[in-house]
């Protein structure tokens, strides 16, 4: 398959002026009674000049083929004249925005999830886009869906069940986007298409496990919070005992220290407010 070849055809204004002159000449021939000559000139001007006039708008291109052979692509915007026998196919060079549909797939550890991506792409090789694939827009849609499915199957949703995972779909958004963009460029290179940006637009657990996974996340958050509370409480108890000992405020034996530690941990680690009890006797009563 030929790669893209950019051509710059002559201006169409000169050809259009020639068409008007020939049309005037044909009219003059009819006026002086030379109808056959005038008809021939008029037919030739209409058949060989008008079909070759081409208008190319900004950020568009015309792919030209002559009798089944690719002759080049006009990318410069303007008014041109090309071989009237060429077939002209318009190909847009603007950026396209693909908002992918939500896909239900399994992540790398088998959890069903919903995922979708937004992809920005444009054509960089018009010859490949037209001749290498049947329909480049459909090709982008299908390959994008395949790439998103492959990405979802490659990583876990998060590291709740796989603590060794270095990249997760939820936590590694930048890395996941870079990998998705790289894979899409590899898949779409055959069609001469470049992916400018690829981002995950929707990510969630599938409805059938969403409630269960929410409970897992809540439990994990509670455990992490409790761990932090216990670590802080132990530090505070240790500091309290150290200060009491350094300043000789009170002398505590091991049993009294154990009681104090127990009481402080209950106060500091409890999830509800405690009600103090005033002891009017000794520590042993």
Image (cartoon, rainbow, N blue to C red):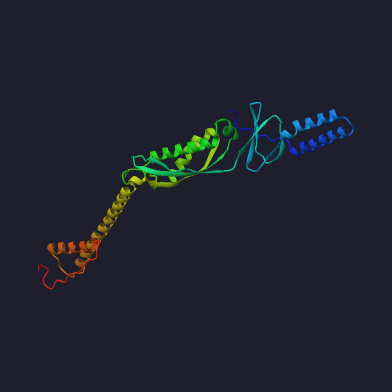
Q: Is residue 92 above or below residue 134?
A: below
Q: Looking at this view, name the residue that lies furthest to the right.
A: 32
Number of dots carrying numbers = 0
Residue drawn at (34%, 48%), measured in percent from left and top? 210
Residue 154 image offset from top left, x and y in percent:
39, 39
Q: Quadrant of residue 116?
A: top left
Residue 87 image offset from top left, x and y in percent:
66, 31
**Quarter of the image where the C terminus is located:** bottom left
Q: Is residue 74 above or below residue 236?
A: above
Residue drawn at (87%, 30%), measured in percent from left and top? 34
**Quarter of the image where the N terminus is located:** top right
The one of 199 and 145 positioned closer to us in this rendering: 145
The one of 105 and 32 positioned closer to us in this rendering: 32
Q: Is residue 168 above or below residue 191?
A: below
Q: Report the side of 32 relative to 277 (left or right).
A: right
Residue 269 image offset from top left, x and y in percent:
24, 60
Q: Report the side of 118 relative to 34 (left or right).
A: left
Q: Quadrant of residue 273?
A: bottom left
Q: Looking at this view, name the residue that lies furthest to the left.
A: 285
Residue 141 image offset from top left, x and y in percent:
50, 38
The one of 244 and 262 positioned closer to us in this rendering: 262
């Amino acid at each position: 398959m030929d790669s893209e070849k950019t051509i710059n055809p002559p201006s169409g204004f000169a050809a259009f002026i020639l068409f008007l002159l020939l049309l005037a000449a044909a009219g003059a021939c009819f006026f002086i009674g030379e109808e056959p000559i005038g008809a021939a000139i008029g037919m030739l001007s209409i058949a060989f000049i008008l079909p070759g006039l081409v208008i190319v708008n900004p950020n568009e291109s015309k792919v030209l083929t002559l009798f089944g052979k690719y002759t080049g692509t006009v990318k410069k915007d303007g008014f041109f004249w090309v071989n009237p026998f060429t077939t002209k196919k318009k190909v847009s060079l603007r950026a396209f925005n693909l908002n992918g549909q939500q896909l239900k797939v399994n992540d790398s550890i088998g959890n069903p999830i919903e995922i979708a991506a937004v992809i920005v792409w444009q054509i960089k090789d018009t010859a490949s886009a037209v001749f290498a694939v049947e329909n480049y827009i459909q090709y982008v849609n299908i390959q994008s869906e395949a790439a998103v499915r492959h990405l979802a199957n490659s990583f876990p949703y998060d590291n709740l069940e796989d603590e060794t995972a270095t990249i997760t779909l939820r936590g590694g958004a930048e890395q996941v986007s870079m990998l998705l963009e790289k894979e899409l460029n590899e898949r779409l290179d055959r069609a001469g298409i470049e992916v400018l940006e690829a981002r995950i637009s929707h990510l969630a657990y599938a409805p059938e496990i969403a409630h269960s996974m929410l409970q897992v996340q809540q439990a994990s958050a509670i455990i992490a919070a409790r761990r932090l509370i216990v670590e802080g409480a132990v530090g505070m108890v240790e500091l309290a005992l150290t200060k009491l000992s350094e300043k000789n405020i009170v002398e505590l034996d091991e049993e009294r220290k154990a009681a104090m530690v127990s009481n402080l941990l209950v106060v500091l680690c409890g999830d509800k407010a405690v009600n103090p009890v005033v002891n009017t006797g000794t520590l042993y009563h």
